[in-house]
Amino acid sequence: MVDFYLYLSAALVTIRQLIQRARKRYRWDTRPTTKRLK
């Protein structure tokens, strides 16, 4: 059971890092960083 949680946490960390790298790599310059409501 402990091994399951260790593998799960490692997978979540890896997925989070991949998402952050993809955001930095595939982001275009004209895209607004936040959606502002007016």
Image: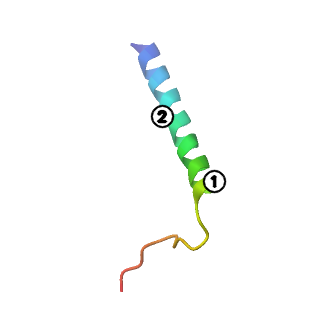
Residue 24: x %, y % from top left: 62, 55
What scheme was used to colour the molecule? rainbow
Residue to which mark 2 is pinned? 12
> Mark 1 belongs to which amino acid?
Arg
> Mark 2 belongs to which amino acid?
Leu
Distance between mark 2 and mark 1 Cα atoms: 20 Å
User: In the rendered image of this protein, does residue 28 appear above or below residue 38?
Assistant: above
Q: Nearer the viewer, residue 8 or 27?
A: 27
Residue 23: x %, y % from top left: 56, 54
User: In the rendered image of this protein, does residue 32 appear above or below residue 20?
Assistant: below
* Closer to viewer: mark 2 or mark 1: 1
Residue 1: give its label: none
Residue 38 appears left or right of 3: left
User: In the rendered image of this protein, does residue 13 appear above or below residue 28?
Assistant: above
- Residue furthest toward the left? 38
Label whose residue precedes the other's in the sequence (2 or 1): 2
Q: Nearer the viewer, residue 21 or 8?
A: 21
Q: Residue at x 43, y 22 (%)?
A: 5
Residue to which mark 1 is pinned? 25
Q: Residue at x 63, y 53 (%)?
A: 25
> Within 10 Å of the Cα at label 2, are there few (<14), some (14-19), or many (20+) other Cα atoms?
few
Image quadrant where residue 30 sits: bottom right
Instruction: Check the picture and name the quadrant holding the N terminus.
Output: top left
Residue 34: x %, y % from top left: 47, 71
> Within 10 Å of the Cα at label 1, are there few (<14), some (14-19), or many (20+) other Cα atoms?
few
